[in-house]
Image (spheres, helix red, strand yellow):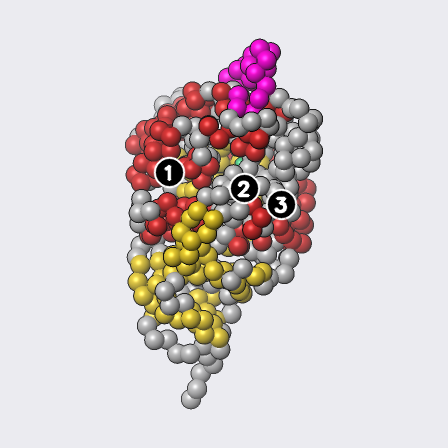
Amino acid sequence: MPTKPYDIVLRGGTVASALAVYPADVAIDGEIIAAIGRNLPTGARDIDVRGKLVLPGGIDSHAHIEQVSAAGILNADTFESATVSAAFGGTTTVISFAAQHIGLKLDEVVEAYHKLAAKGAVIDYAFHMIIADPTEATLKDHIPKLVKAGHATIKVFMTYDRIKLDDMQLLDVLHAARESSALVCVHAENHAMISWTGKRLIANGYRAPRYHGISHPRACEAEAFNRVIALAAYIDQPIMIFHVSSAEGAARIRQARGEGLKVFAETCPQYLFLTFEDLDRPEFEGAKWICSPPLRQKSDQEALWHALALGDLQTVSSDHAPYRADRSGKFVVSDNPNFKEIPNGMPGLETRLPLLFDAMVSQGRMSLEKFVSLSATEPAKIYGLHPNKGDIVIGGDADIVVWDPHRTVTIRAAMLHDRAGYSPYEGRTVTGWPVTVLSRGRVVVDEGALKAAPGSGRFIARAAGAAAVPTGLRGPEFDPARNFGAHI
Ligand code: DUC
Ligand code: ZN
Ligand code: ZN
């Protein structure tokens, strides 16, 4: 009795997960991985992937898409252009932001980003909710409701004039997240040190992009990490520290984790592959390399690689924040801006995986399993997407990248699909490139051609995973046996 053939069989490749690398065919039925094995029967469509790696689609858990920035400007990508760019780079799920600004109702903000994404996205997506206005309604009404609706992560800023939270507000958000079982992600830099240094630099005539890095002193990262770790430990709320850039920052995270605190952390390719010298270019060219936290030293890169190897940092996301080098973006204030007037951020959705694969696997810094872990499996686990995403497992979503480990490509902005108009990695040559990308069984990209329509990506509702579960060890001040029975 003949059975219906699998819809697609990826035949003869090498499957890699975070745990193992092994030869196997992968069969897909509809949106789901149906079988993994040797010599699977012929599919309705058989794709020859001999000599290629079959990897879980990348998960980019930190990308700013069609978002209004702290300074009120829109970044260069739409959900369509950003997710097309992500897909060409081997990423099949993005977590971008629903960004509340002061005075906005969080539920309306989330609804607005839903509409934008539903219209444009070609791959699956979710949102971190940025809380800039932790009012009673935000904390007591919207956060519980929205977490239940599948937005299990919150982001807060400790710097940027218009969106930063003070320590009282941070405690409020940490507490609200604990009550609703959400994970809190943090942009942690000391705001006063940045503002004070920036003001003095500009007053003394140091206006060029290169001074951006100086205006974010190294100590402002470790100080803010220290503070938010202490606040989160007091509340007993797990946190994720975004874009770790410095050796001191990584050390502070290692210490916290060593103390048993639930502190997770990411870094980004820009902190692994670029340095502060990239800001030091003639005229305003350095503006393209302005991001926060800023690019640091070679020695910080080594410290971050070490922290990745040790597991202190668990993910590498792009922090894609594209601004064109024109009056719509980097030069929105004037043609002759001081470094404080230049929007922060750089593009990176499409180059994240090729850069990482080249450094980790092609150049032999770390294993293929670790590459899969950092780029897909760990973000899936931390953000409540696993096992449907971030792995190659029977029953999981067929989000798969067929990767040519031998293809050598020189990165040029002209071949990328975002709208930034430049790449911080222009001219860099990498070995290893995605050739076919599938999202829930649909071929989205094949040999340089886009195959999916805008709006074909889907919102993925997430409940917080194990990462967001408190340790149960709150500050003793919360313990009725030790606080004279008080309820805080
Ligand atoms: N810094 C941020 O905080 N967000 C977007 C990009 C950047 O450089
Ligand atoms: Zn940030
Ligand atoms: Zn960011």
Q: Position of residue 441 (x, y in %)?
A: 51, 65
Q: Which of 38 and 175 lies nearest the eye of the viewer? A: 38
Q: Is residue 377 magenta?
A: no
Mark 2 residue type: Ser
Instruction: Point out which mark residue 423 bears.
Output: 2
Q: Nearer the viewer, mark 2 or mark 3?
A: 2
Mark 1 residue type: Leu
Q: Secondary structure at mark 1?
A: loop
Q: Is residue 385 left or right of residue 322?
A: left
Give the main secondary structure, helix, strand or loop, of the magenta stretch.
Answer: helix
Q: Position of residue 384 (x, y in %)?
A: 46, 49
Residue named by callout 1: 313
* Residues at discs 2 and 3 in contact (Cβ within 8 Å): no
Q: Is residue 205 magenta?
A: yes
C-alpha separation, residue under disc 3 versus residue under disc 1: 29 Å
Q: Residue at x 38, y 60 (%)?
A: 53
Q: Position of residue 440 (x, y in %)?
A: 51, 62
Q: Which of 14 and 362 lies nearest the eye of the viewer? A: 362
Q: Residue at x 58, y 63 (%)?
A: 451
Mark 1: give few (<14), some (14-19) or many (20+) Cα within 10 Å. many
Which residue sits furthest bottom?
Answer: 1
Q: Residue at x 39, y 62 (%)?
A: 52
Q: Secondary structure at mark 3?
A: loop
Instruction: Point out which mark residue 9 bears.
Output: none
Mark 3 residue type: Arg
Q: Which of 229 and 475 lies nearest the eye of the viewer? A: 229
State the extent of the magenta-drawn residues as a range. 193-211
Q: Quadrant of residue 110?
A: top right
Instruction: Point out which mark residue 419 bears.
Output: 3
Cβ of mark 2 under 8 Å from ligand 1: the answer is no
Cβ of mark 3 under 8 Å from ligand 1: the answer is no
Cβ of mark 1 under 8 Å from ligand 2: the answer is no
